[in-house]
Image (cartoon, helix red, strand yellow):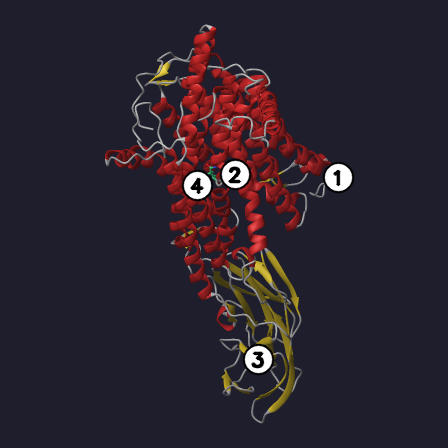
């Protein structure tokens, strides 16, 4: 765990690759391959939900569940890829074959998004939706198989290119590998949404999903070609038979044999796997022990991913309740997620070249497992930050009526000031064309209201849990109208807008993105959702028009009133009044930056280290399998999000963040204890010793095997307090 090379280790070079600055040239092809592959994956993923919703016309629920199923599948298939690589084809061939499957999947997605293929009536919408659905589902399945399948192989294959003495270079490789993942994903999540927004088509123009999927498909082909070009330079470790089958059989035999010898008359053995000795090679048993030790250590790890993966869900939802104006730049809620890869690109080099060396200089032995523990704590701090931000947001949210209450707003549609008397409130003076600033809260039911002088009294019914606006007519003796207002913040940072027409003629209101329709005299429109930014409404009454412009923030709701006195023409802007029913989001999105900073710093310490740890602690014939085990913790983490959120059902979002942070701290504590008892091994050294011993004569062989075994068992069971011990074993 130090940066120094181990002089005892062999200096033999792996593969035929030239070296550049001490690094095999072959890894250049591997990191470029990873960059292109991640571009392909994240680029396609960035527009997937929109494709489901707007191209396949699925509802939100179906779109999000298919999306999450796909993502989960991408982290389950690594097991398959790893087994194929380590037991059968080897990593090189597995990467080539599965990359072809992957590229076919991406091409299938691109083709499935060409609406012209089935648009026989040329109206711009596909006529045979089944074709598009089936093709895209086949495409997604192939992509999940490909991306998941190659993922553990590419990382392990990269690690294989380094000789045993190149520990430091291999660690740097895993950092650069991680930089490429994030560089590729950052670029593609910016580019593919832009491609999607273009219009394209042969017979009719539609949003260009085929291009948004086509470019990732092209990048996957580039990834494949780059990987093949490096072919002559790679070190290709041969698979050693059906290793996974042997492992399963060996474990099964050990369990059976242990059970058969459960009586006290049989002497105990150091490790339960030693019960396989009668039938299986000692080297295989030793290798299984190495893998099991690491897999056992992985048990608490999914909790980290549980928190990490909420960036894309809960944190994005949180951003929708915040203000995204950064000066003249407007950041959309889902764009905040790009802060993660941007920070990765800056934090990985800082950690590697400043923080870790500085910690080493201070004489602290910052071992991989210690880094991972600190990474978990940083993720927990990120969630505490998220909870604090949430508390600030909650303070600015409107108080909506409880289930037994009702809230009422008043809008004076007349041209003179009126005085309104309501039970439990002081008389309220409303000037012409004005609405009350606030909603008044009452117990639901009937209340008496009197308006004007001489007073006109009316009894109105207030609905439970509702917000309503009482429209007081121009002539107060006319019928009073009650509107139903929205009772929650508009979703996704949109603004809910409606118009009330106080004129004696119908008015049509429209903007390029929405049409409020024809609003009858003394009537009102439905709400329309509008994005943030400057919007110009065009009002038409007969042949007369009026343009009304205003700026919207995020998450507000307004009722615009067109008074009876409105004069159409250039000065109409001043006559229209706006009632703010729900204030725009006021807590700034920049407040999310600390939580992104902590989760990303945590990711660098946890994930980059874990990737390298999984490689360095795996026996030579199960490198990809252990990488898959590492990725499996990501899949489990995603499932835990669903389970905990469903079971906890906390009324306040900030409390859920605190719950997740506390769970991670608890898990981190358990992990640190497990890590304390973990002894770092050098699999290559142990394997070499076993192989050497097998070649010795029988007597000697027996003796040495016993010695090695005792040595290994000691490592398993005895806690060594000396961190710098001569055998270069390092404890946490
Ligand atoms: C689970 C991770 C090891 C997956 C890794 N993701 C990242 O590096 C993220 N920082 C990328 C970001 C765009 C979400 C990956 O291999 O994709």
Mark 2 Cβ and ligand 1 under 8 Å apart: yes
Quadrant assignment for the N terminus: top left
N-terminal of the pair, mark 3 or mark 2, is: 3
The residue wearing badge 4 is 671
**Mark 2 burial class by Cα count in 10 Å: few <14, some 14-19, many 20+:** many
The residue wearing badge 3 is 442
Mark 4 Cβ and ligand 1 under 8 Å apart: no
Q: Is label 3 or label 2 in front?
A: 2
N-terminal of the pair, mark 2 or mark 4, is: 2
Q: Residue 716 location in percent, x, y?
A: 43, 29
Judging depth in this view, the residue of 520 and 29 nearest the camera is 29
The residue wearing badge 1 is 128
Residue 634's disc is 2
Judging depth in this view, the residue of 571 and 435 nearest the camera is 435
Disc 3 secondary structure class: strand
Q: Residue furthest bottom?
A: 454
Q: Is label 3 or label 1 in front?
A: 3
């Amino acid at each position: 765990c130090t940066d120094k090379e181990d002089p005892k280790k062999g200096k033999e070079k792996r593969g035929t690759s030239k070296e550049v600055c001490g690094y095999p040239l072959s890894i250049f092809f591997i990191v470029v391959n990873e960059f292109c592959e991640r571009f392909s994956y994240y680029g396609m993923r960035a527009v997937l939900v929109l494709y489901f919703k707007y191209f396949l016309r699925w509802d939100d629920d179906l779109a999000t569940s298919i999306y999450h199923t796909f993502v989960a599948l991408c982290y389950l298939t690594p097991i398959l890829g790893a087994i194929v690589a380590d037991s059968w084809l080897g990593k090189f061939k597995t990467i080539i074959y599965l990359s072809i499957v992957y590229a076919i999947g991406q091409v299938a997605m691109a083709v499935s998004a060409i609406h012209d293929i089935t648009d026989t009536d040329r109206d711009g919408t596909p006529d045979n939706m089944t074709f598009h659905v089936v093709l895209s589902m086949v495409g997604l399945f192939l992509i999940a198989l490909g991306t998941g399948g190659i993922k553990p192989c590419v990382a392990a294959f990269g690690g294989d290119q380094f000789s045993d003495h190149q520990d430091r270079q291999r660690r740097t490789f895993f950092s650069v590998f991680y930089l490429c993942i994030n560089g590729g994903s950052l670029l593609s999540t910016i580019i593919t949404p832009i491609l999607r927004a273009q219009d394209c088509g042969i017979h009719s123009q539609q949003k260009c999903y085929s291009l948004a999927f086509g470019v990732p498909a092209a990048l996957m082909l580039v990834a494949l070609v780059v990987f093949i070009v490096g072919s002559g330079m790679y070190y290709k470790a041969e698979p050693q038979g059906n290793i996974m089958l042997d492992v399963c059989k060996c474990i099964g035999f050990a369990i059976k044999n242990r059970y058969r010898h459960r009586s006290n008359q049989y002497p105990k053995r150091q490790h339960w796997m030693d019960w396989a000795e009668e039938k299986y090679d000692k080297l295989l048993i030793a290798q299984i022990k190495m893998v099991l030790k690491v897999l056992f250590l992985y048990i608490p790890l999914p909790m980290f991913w549980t928190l990490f993966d909420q960036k894309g869900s809960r944190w994005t939802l949180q951003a929708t309740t915040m203000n995204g104006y950064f000066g003249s730049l407007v950041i959309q809620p889902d764009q905040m997620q790009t802060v993660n890869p941007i920070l990765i690109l800056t934090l990985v080099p800082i950690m590697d070249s400043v923080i870790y060396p500085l910690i080493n200089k201070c004489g602290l032995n910052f071992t991989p497992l210690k880094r991972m523990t600190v990474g978990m704590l940083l993720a927990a701090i990120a969630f505490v930050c998220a909870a604090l931000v949430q508390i600030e947001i909650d303070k600015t949210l409107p108080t909506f009526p409880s289930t037994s209450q009702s809230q009422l707003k008043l809008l004076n549609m007349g041209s003179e000031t009126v005085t309104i008397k309501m039970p439990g409130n002081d008389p309220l003076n409303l000037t012409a064309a004005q609405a009350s600033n606030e909603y008044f809260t009452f117990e639901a039911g009937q209340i008496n209201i009197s308006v004007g002088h001489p007073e006109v009294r009316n009894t109105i019914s207030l609905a439970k849990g509702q917000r309503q606006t009482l429209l007081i007519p121009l002539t107060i003796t006319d019928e009073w109208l009650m509107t139903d207002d929205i009772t929650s913040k508009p979703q996704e940072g949109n603004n809910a807008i409606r118009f009330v027409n106080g004129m004696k003629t119908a008015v049509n209101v429209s903007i390029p993105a929405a049409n409020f329709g024809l609003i009858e005299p003394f009537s009102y429109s439905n709400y329309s959702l509008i994005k943030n930014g400057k919007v110009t409404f065009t009002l038409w009454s007969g042949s007369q028009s009026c343009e009304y412009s205003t700026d919207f923030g995020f998450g507000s709701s307004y009722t615009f009133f067109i008074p009876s006195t409105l004069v159409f023409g250039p000065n109409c802007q001043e006559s229209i009044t706006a009632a703010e029913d729900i204030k725009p989001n006021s807590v700034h999105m920049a407040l999310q930056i600390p939580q992104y900073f902590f989760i990303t710093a945590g990711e660098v310490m946890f994930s980059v280290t874990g990737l390298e740890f999984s490689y360095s602690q795996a026996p030579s014939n199960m490198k990809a399998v252990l990488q898959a085990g590492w990725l499996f913790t990501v899949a489990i983490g995603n499932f835990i999000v669903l389970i905990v959120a469903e079971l906890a059902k906390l009324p306040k979002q900030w409390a859920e963040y605190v719950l997740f942070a506390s769970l991670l701290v608890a898990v981190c504590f358990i992990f640190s204890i497990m890590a304390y008892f973990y002894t770092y091994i050098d699999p290559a050294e142990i394997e070499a010793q076993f192989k050497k011993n097998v070649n010795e004569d029988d007597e000697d062989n027996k003796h040495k095997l016993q010695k090695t075994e005792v040595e290994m068992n000691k490592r398993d069971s005895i806690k060594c307090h000396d961190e710098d011990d001569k055998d270069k074993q390092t404890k946490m």
